[in-house]
Amino acid sequence: MIFRTSQKIFYIPGLFKIKYILDHPFITFSLTLVICSASVWFGNAALSKYRTKDSETASDLGIIQTATLTLLALIIGFTFSMAIDRHDQREVLEEAEANAIGTEFLRADLLPSNSTSAIKALLVRYLDQRILFYTEQNEEPLQEISKRTDDLETALWQEVLPLARSQTHAMLALAVSGMNDVLNSRGYTQAAWWNRIPYTAWGLMGAIAICANLLVGFGARNFTHNVALFMIFPFVIAVSFFLIADIDSPRGGVIRVEPRNLLQLKNTLNPHGAGKLSTSEK
């Protein structure tokens, strides 16, 4: 295995990135179900022959199984809480971003008329790009969106910079501060989207899940006649992993951060053309 610290990505040689698996919760579900089911089967087929049948050993095995399952439940619960916190943070920052853009759109009226119209036009285009950031799923278009957003940020700052250098009154300072909030809000949002559950947490949770399934298979006394019953446990773990991966994945999951506040702002700023991005902006 190859670890790349700077990008926090590790590869399975010749196959695919772990990041890709976690970005697609249905793949996470399928892989978890297969691995956990295989662990139950292996625990029964290969390890159960080493199990003694005396009552003391059975009692000890029950204690170990209970402790392992409890630890697994706690780890899944804590990881789920981490995913929820990150998802909530992304939604809060989406709202903050919409508020920053809307506030600066209003504060643009404090500037000279020629600068006001230019800044408002740029802010509308900037808003379109921010909406696309939330709705686009493919990596290549996202790179183009990021480039256009960078260009618009530069243009916005260049509009207020000459005014800030030539004038120092309070109203201008308010407009410049609002523009700074607009630019900062994008950085905060991007940081929140990069803030995912660490791979080490996934690895620990996966290792404990495999151990728990091995113990379930190891302790099964009538596995061949109740295979479907023993597959319930791997299925439940797979569903748990799916839900955590789905909430933690900003783009690839079923549960996503929708740009509701940004769309509402677009409706407010451009009620007749709301929701329609020009071909050049897509």
Image (cartoon, grey):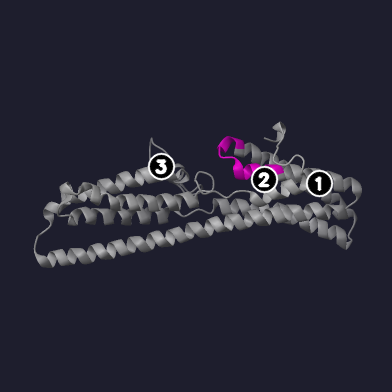
In-image side of 231 versus 132 (left or right): left
Front in this rendered view, residue 81 or 265 = 265
Q: Quadrant of residue 147?
A: top right
**Badge 2: residue crowd in 10 Å (few <14, some 14–19, many ≥20):** many
Distance, label 1 to label 2, CA atoms, is 15 Å
Chief SS of the magenta region = helix
Looking at the picture, how far across and down is residue 30, in whole percent?
Answer: 36, 43
Q: Residue at x 64, y 36 (%)?
A: 144
Q: At label 1, which amino acid type do we have?
A: Lys
Seen in the picture, residue 241 relative to 135 is either above or below; the reply is below
Label 2: state its secondary structure: helix
The residue lying at 24 percent from left, 62 percent from top is 65
Asked if marks 3 and 2 touch (Cβ < 8 Å), the reply is no
Q: Is residue 215 above or below residue 273?
A: below
Residue occupied by mark 3: 27
Name the mark on residue 63. Answer: none
The numbered dot on residue 120 is 1
Q: Residue at x 51, y 49 (%)?
A: 255
Image coordinates for residue 48, horizontal then vertical, percent:
15, 53
What is the CA distance from the residue labelled 3 to the residue labelled 2? 28 Å
Circle 3 Cα neighbour tier, 10 Å, few/some/many (<14 / 14–19 / ≥20): some
Mark 3 or mark 2: whose residue is earlier in sequence: 3
Q: Are marks 3 and 1 in contact (CB under 8 Å)?
A: no
> Taking the image as drawn, is residue 173 in sight?
yes
> Residue 18, position in %: x, y?
42, 44
Q: Write the residue at 35% across / 61% down.
A: 73
Residue numbers of the magenta segment: 128-141
Residue 130's disc is 2
